[in-house]
């Protein structure tokens, strides 16, 4: 389900943050400006605003790949994967607050301006509060799943199914489930 949503979102218009980041990259060197013009011609686009989110991401990656005199070798921009992961971890207000605070402290407008090192630091901070166990990357049950399960447990029959499932997993209550286990239980109760 999320995959389809992601595909749909990739086809939307370029975001304001992407426009700002592309502008910053273009202004940083002539080589990047040339690569920008080449990319636009290749895509058959007149203006940067005509790009889709996916095309803009592709362009940003190409422009970030070109080093220039202003780039410090230790200041390599965050990868597309890091940025996507940070965005995926933005599942609650606490995560959004931590990201905003981190960006303010680093004097960055968006996550697109983070270096690889900064992105890694932010990911670690977000993983700590997003229910991801760093040792084995197991995500704990989400608030949404928990709420949905509580609503599903509206009959004795469903409560028995849930109790059996929890016993099988050696869990005392639904709050102890992982996200994956919660999904399985939701399917059993539907």
Image: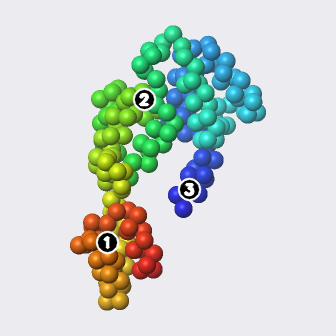
Q: What residue is shown with label 2?
A: 116
The quarter holding residue 151 reads bottom left
User: Along the line of sight, which residue is nearer the eye, 135 or 114?
Assistant: 135
Q: Position of residue 45 (x, y in %)?
A: 72, 33
First-in-chain label (1 vs 3):
3
Q: Position of residue 99 (x, y in %)?
A: 34, 40
Label 2 with label 3: CB-CB less than 8 Å:
no
Tag 3, which secondary structure? helix
First-in-chain label (2 vs 3):
3
Residue found at the far bottom of this picture? 156
Judge whether residue 154 can be spotted in this image.
no
Vertical comparison of 187 with 114: above or below: below
Q: What residue is shown with label 1?
A: 169
How far separated are the C-alphas under marks 2 and 3? 25 Å
The quarter holding residue 165 reads bottom left
Residue found at the far left of this picture? 172
Say which mark, if any, is on residue 3. Answer: 3
User: Along the line of sight, which residue is nearer the eye, 8 or 135?
Assistant: 135
Q: Quadrant of the N terminus?
A: bottom right
The structure residue drawn at horizontal position 46% and vertical position 23%, both measured from the top left corner, is: 76
Tag 1, which secondary structure? loop
**Horizontal relation, residue 176 to residue 23: left or right:** left
Q: What coloring was used for the rendering?
A: rainbow
Say which mark, if any, is on residue 97. Answer: none
The structure residue drawn at horizontal position 44% and vertical position 48%, both measured from the top left corner, is: 88
Tag 2, which secondary structure? helix
The structure residue drawn at horizontal position 48% and vertical position 42%, both measured from the top left corner, is: 84
């Amino acid at each position: 389900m999320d995959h389809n949503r992601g595909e749909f979102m990739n086809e939307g218009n370029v975001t304001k943050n992407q426009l700002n980041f592309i502008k910053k990259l273009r202004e940083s060197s002539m080589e990047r400006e040339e690569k920008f013009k080449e990319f636009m011609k290749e895509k058959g686009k007149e203006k940067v605003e005509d790009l889709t989110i996916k095309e803009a991401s592709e362009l940003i990656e190409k422009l970030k790949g070109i080093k220039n005199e202003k780039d410090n070798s230790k200041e390599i921009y965050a990868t597309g994967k890091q940025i996507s992961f940070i965005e995926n971890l933005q599942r609650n207000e606490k995560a959004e607050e931590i990201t905003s605070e981190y960006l303010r402290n680093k004097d960055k407008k968006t996550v697109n301006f983070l270096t690889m090192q900064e992105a890694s630091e932010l990911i670690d901070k977000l993983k700590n509060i997003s229910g991801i166990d760093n040792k084995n990357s197991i995500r704990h049950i989400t608030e949404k799943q928990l709420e949905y399960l509580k609503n599903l447990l509206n009959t004795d029959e469903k409560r028995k199914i849930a109790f059996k499932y929890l016993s099988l997993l050696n869990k005392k209550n639904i709050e102890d489930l992982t996200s994956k286990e919660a999904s399985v239980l939701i399917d059993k109760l539907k």
